Image (tube, helix red, strand yellow):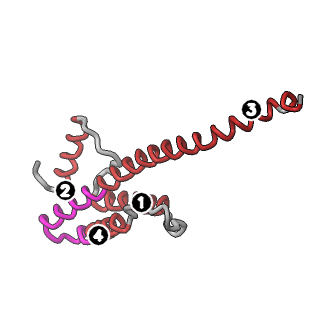
Amino acid sequence: MDSLLHLERDFYQQGLDSGLPHGHLHGLIEGRELGRDHAWTLWDEIGYIQGTALLWKQILAVQGPPSSSSRAASTLDSLLALVDAFPTHNDSEAAQGDVDMTAQLSTLRTKYRTACAALGIRPRMAVSSTNGDTAQGQDSLKSMGMSV
């Protein structure tokens, strides 16, 4: 009779004992997938910023040393330094309390917009494959005096 009185509690405990490890495992899998997708998006943006900064730096080197390009060149140098300083791996065993990726990303985006303003180019934060964006990129190069 005692086993009938505690039947619900026993089934609850049995379900908890089998479901908790299963939920933990699936939570880790989903968390890793979400982290991988977010990291891909983040590094796509940072790679775009780095690539455009390197391109603009080369264009400034070809154009020669006007007075306004020294400010733009120093801004591009500091932008590339921020890209190089951005963390490239996540060591889950080490303490990550001293790395604030959100603040670093915000600083990087701000410096990117500052570099765009120094060069007289409208900032874009994503690469698109539409023809309109290609034409806009060519217009930006033409405004800097480069032929396309």
Which residue does the numbered mark 2 point to in the structure image?
144
Dot 2 or dot 4, earlier in sequence: 4
Discs 4/3, front: 3
Which residue does the numbered mark 3 point to in the structure image?
11
* Amino acid type, residue under disc 4 in the picture: Asp
Dot 2 or dot 1, earlier in sequence: 1
Could you tell me if the residues under marks 2 and 1 are in contact, i.e. CB atoms within 8 Å?
no
Could you tell me if the residues under marks 3 and 1 are in contact, i.e. CB atoms within 8 Å?
no
Neighbours of disc 4 within 10 Å: few (<14), some (14-19), many (20+): some
* Amino acid type, residue under disc 1 in the picture: Thr
Dot 3 or dot 2, earlier in sequence: 3
Q: Secondary structure at mark 4?
A: helix
Residue 43 location, x and y as percent? 35, 53
For the residue pair 26 and 147, the one nearer the viewer reads as 26
Position above or below: 5 against 27: above
Which residue does the numbered mark 1 point to in the structure image?
110
Dot 3 or dot 1, earlier in sequence: 3
Residue at 28 percent of width and 40 percent of height: 128
Magenta segment range? 49-70
Q: Secondary structure at mark 2?
A: loop
Which residue does the numbered mark 4 point to in the structure image?
77
Neighbours of disc 1 within 10 Å: few (<14), some (14-19), many (20+): few
Q: Secondary structure at mark 3?
A: helix
Dot 4 or dot 1, earlier in sequence: 4
Residue at 53 percent of width and 67 percent of height: 95
Is residue 88 inside the magenta stretch?
no
Is residue 50 inside the magenta stretch?
yes
Quadrant for residue 76, please give it: bottom left
